[in-house]
Image (tube, rainbow, N blue to C red):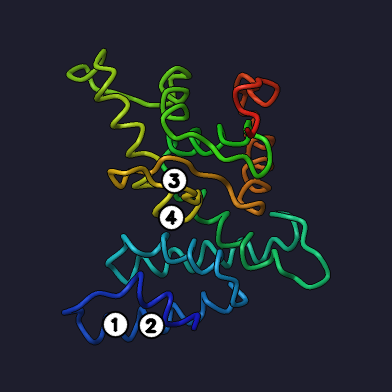
């Protein structure tokens, strides 16, 4: 089950057999750290899916191992070890993000736990906070900036399984999303470590569930 899920996301047709064999072996080693947890496997798959070279997979494996060697400092884990696989893999996925996407992810810590986030409003907030960069050619175009902001969410955070989709609209675009509890714990920890400051929105009535 776990192997098939990773293979579904990360392996492609017409792949060189030698490359396939090396990736498969690396994938099996990294899957051991996931402990069969679907979230950990999905995050790992999202991290690997855009990496075609064996050397890139080696880098991911080393980064995951690095967090394993750190022990319990990434996230607290209970006696069953259920957070172990998620914490090491998700921390590696966070480290792999470009700096502006790290800020976008950290901003999500401002939302209450289990909150269903309106994507349209979120992308507007990212723009207002200056978290979405633009070139001089598109600067000032609200529509294009919102498209860029939406792309940061869907092609980076959602595809990496760092953010989960709750609802799609009639056109197939993501309407609402939320953070898994363990991803939110990572978000809160990284926010503290990196002294990320954003205007708190948790007390604003517009974010309360209706």
Q: Residue 8, percent across and down?
A: 35, 75
The residue singled out by tag 2 in the image is 24
Location of residue 64 (image quadrant): bottom right
Q: Secondary structure at mark 4?
A: loop
Taking 28 as reference, is 83 left or right? right
Q: Secondary structure at mark 2?
A: helix
Q: Are marks 2 and 1 in contact (CB under 8 Å)?
A: yes
Foreground disc of the pair 4, 1: 4
- Alpha-carbon span between mark 3 and mark 4: 10 Å
Q: Is residue 112 above or below residue 1?
A: above
Foreground disc of the pair 2, 4: 4
Q: Residue at x 19, y 78 (%)?
A: 13
The residue singled out by tag 4 in the image is 160
Quadrant where the image shows the C terminus: top right
- Alpha-carbon span between mark 4 and mark 1: 21 Å
- Alpha-carbon span between mark 2 and mark 1: 6 Å
Taking 115 as reference, is 146 left or right? left
Q: Residue at x 60, y 71 (%)?
A: 37
Location of residue 58 (image quadrant): bottom left
Estimate how packed mark 4 is, as few (under 14), some (14 to 19) or many (20 or more) residues with alpha carbons within 10 Å.
Answer: many
Estimate how packed mark 1 is, as few (under 14), some (14 to 19) or many (20 or more) residues with alpha carbons within 10 Å.
Answer: some
**Residue lying at the far right of the rendered structure:** 79
Label placed on residue 97: 3
Q: Residue at x 23, y 87 (%)?
A: 17
The residue singled out by tag 1 in the image is 20
Q: Residue 88, percent across and down?
A: 61, 62
- Alpha-carbon span between mark 3 and mark 1: 25 Å
**Residue lying at the far top of the rendered structure:** 140
């Amino acid at each position: 089950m776990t192997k098939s899920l990773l293979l579904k996301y990360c392996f492609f047709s017409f792949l060189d057999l030698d490359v396939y064999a090396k990736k498969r072996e690396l994938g099996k080693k990294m899957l051991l750290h996931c402990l069969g947890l679907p979230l950990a496997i999905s995050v790992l798959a999202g991290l690997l899916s855009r990496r075609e070279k064996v050397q890139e997979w080696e880098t991911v494996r080393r980064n995951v191992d690095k967090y394993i060697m750190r022990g319990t400092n990434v996230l607290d884990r209970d006696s069953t070890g259920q957070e172990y696989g998620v914490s090491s893999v998700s921390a590696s996925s966070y480290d792999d993000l470009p700096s502006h996407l790290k800020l976008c992810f950290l901003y999500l810590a401002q939302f209450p736990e289990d909150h269903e986030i309106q994507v349209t409003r979120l992308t507007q907030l990212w723009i207002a906070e200056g978290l979405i960069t633009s070139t001089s050619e598109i600067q000032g175009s609200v529509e294009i900036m919102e498209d860029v902001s939406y792309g940061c969410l869907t092609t980076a955070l959602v595809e990496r399984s760092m953010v989960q989709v709750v609802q799609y609209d009639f056109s197939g675009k993501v309407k609402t999303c939320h953070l898994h509890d363990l991803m939110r714990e990572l978000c809160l920890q990284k926010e503290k470590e990196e002294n990320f400051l954003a205007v708190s929105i948790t007390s604003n009535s517009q974010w309360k569930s209706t």
